[in-house]
Image (cartoon, rainbow, N blue to C red):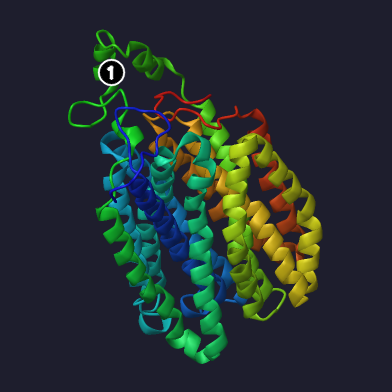
Amino acid sequence: MTHDKPTTEKPGPVTRTTGDLKRAAVSGWLGTAMEFMDFQLYSLAAAIVFNEIFFPDVSPAIGLIAAMGTYGVGYVARLVGAVYFGRMGDRIGRKQVLFITIALMGASTTLIGVLPTYAQIGIAAPALLVVLRLVQGFGAGAEIAGATTMLAEYAPAKRRGVIASLVSLGTNSGTLAATGLWAILIAVLSEEQLLSWGWRLPFLLSFFLMILAVWIRRNLKESPVFEDRADLDEDGVALSREQIAAQAATSEEKSVLDAALKQRKGKAFFIALGLRFGQAGNSGLIQTFLVGFLATTLLLDRSIATNALLISSAVGFATVPLVGLISDRVGRRPVYMALTVISGILAFPLMHLIAQGHTVAVTISMILLHNLAVLGLFSLESVTMAELFGARTRFTQLALAKEIGGILATAIGPLLAATLTAATGSWWPIAAMLVAYSGITLISAIVSPEVQGRDLVLLEDAA
């Protein structure tokens, strides 16, 4: 583009054009869409067919728990990926890591589509499924953290909330695509066709999305905030603590480097972890467990839950940027508090309506829960967590907060919900867990500093 304008609000050593910002936005959105499409494809398959394909010799309830267990192992691998790729991204840059993670995710998801079933090779089938889930999780562990970091570091401070929310928009884009594919398959295929070969199609089609994402990221420039950091050497690689200490003695940026060295780590991380907890836990319950619960426990038609998520994901295209825009106007903390309080208040009445089994009530209730307790919080999470952390460890801390929150809430949540609903024969444990998750995030928002518009080049955390 010949008429691009710099996106930074004040002159600095490193600037990016409007075209660069657009490419970063598309890259972040597409990578997150692919991650959530991959995981939603799997979570819906786990809830709808995997108990019969990979765990056919157990009761339906135990099969659902086993399928959710394989869903959960991916989150363990995500934690390993968060540490490995997060440190790499903070040391050598965001761009290289994002290229690797998207390739790992796409390849493993495609290979799930060619797996033999339990009927063909026995216990080796679920074992191979777990291996691919581990590879998929390893790549995904730093994908959304990297995309969030990259786009937040590209965005002008006054529009950071709405621009960074584009990463979150990838969540419902991926959910919409995955749910739409499953809705079509359920509508046009018989039960026999779905179980024999139809379930493979969504995983195989994800290959084309991977190719597009890899191509876009080949042309993406490095984050301007990363390149403007005070703790990089001449080759653009982060200095060690010892090197920083030596440089601080003679550098004109002594105060900046000293602040990064002397700050105690931990508070910002635990605030971010609490903010993540509500969104991650609510997502696992609403987008994963509830789908299987409606089909296997309430014995509702499988299309009801998938259609509800399909509509809700479409509604999210308005919810996500709107929440980001409001947070740019009034701050991150007030919007966090409002969303979590409303989610907690509505959890029991909406779950009661869902339990009645009426299609319209189920659809409306799932749309409200999904947009308020999942998509709205994720829109805030994308920018708030990036602003909480300093530039030196932003990628690593953001990735760890997301993935530890995912393990504690999203991976364990569906398993716990399956166990509690099986033991009680009721829906109320789901509502109680929604209240608990939202409450933890509310407390974290209350104790958090307001970080709206913070200078992301600062090496130290906001708290």
Q: Name the spot of residue 184 as percent of width and height, x first.
A: 53, 82
Report which residue position mark 1 lands on.
Answer: 244
| 108 up-or-down from 441: above or below | below
- For label 1, the SS is helix
Q: Name the spot of residue 188 as percent of width and height, x first.
A: 53, 89
Q: Nearer the viewer, residue 403 or 304?
A: 304
**Amino acid type for the residue under numbered disc 1:** Ile
| Left or right relative to 337: residue 137 | left
Q: How many marks?
A: 1
Question: Residue pushed farthest top?
Answer: 249
| 40 up-or-down from 241: above or below | below
Q: Quadrant of residue 145?
A: top left
Q: Quadrant of residue 288?
A: bottom right
Q: Is residue 424 visible?
A: yes
Residue plotted at (77% across, 71% down): 361
Q: Name the spot of residue 160 as percent of width and height, x first.
A: 50, 40
Residue plotted at (45% across, 27% down): 455
Q: Name the spot of residue 392 as percent of width and height, x first.
A: 36, 29
| 195 up-or-down from 330: above or below | below
| 220 up-or-down from 367: above or below | above
Residue plotted at (44% across, 18% down): 263
| Left or right relative to 213: residue 308 | right
Question: Residue pushed farthest left?
Answer: 235
Residue plotted at (40% across, 64% down): 130
Q: Nearer the viewer, residue 338 or 37?
A: 338
Q: Is residue 415 visible?
A: no
Question: For the residue carrying disc 1, how many other residues have a C-alpha within 10 Å: few (<14), some (14-19), or many (20+)?
Answer: many
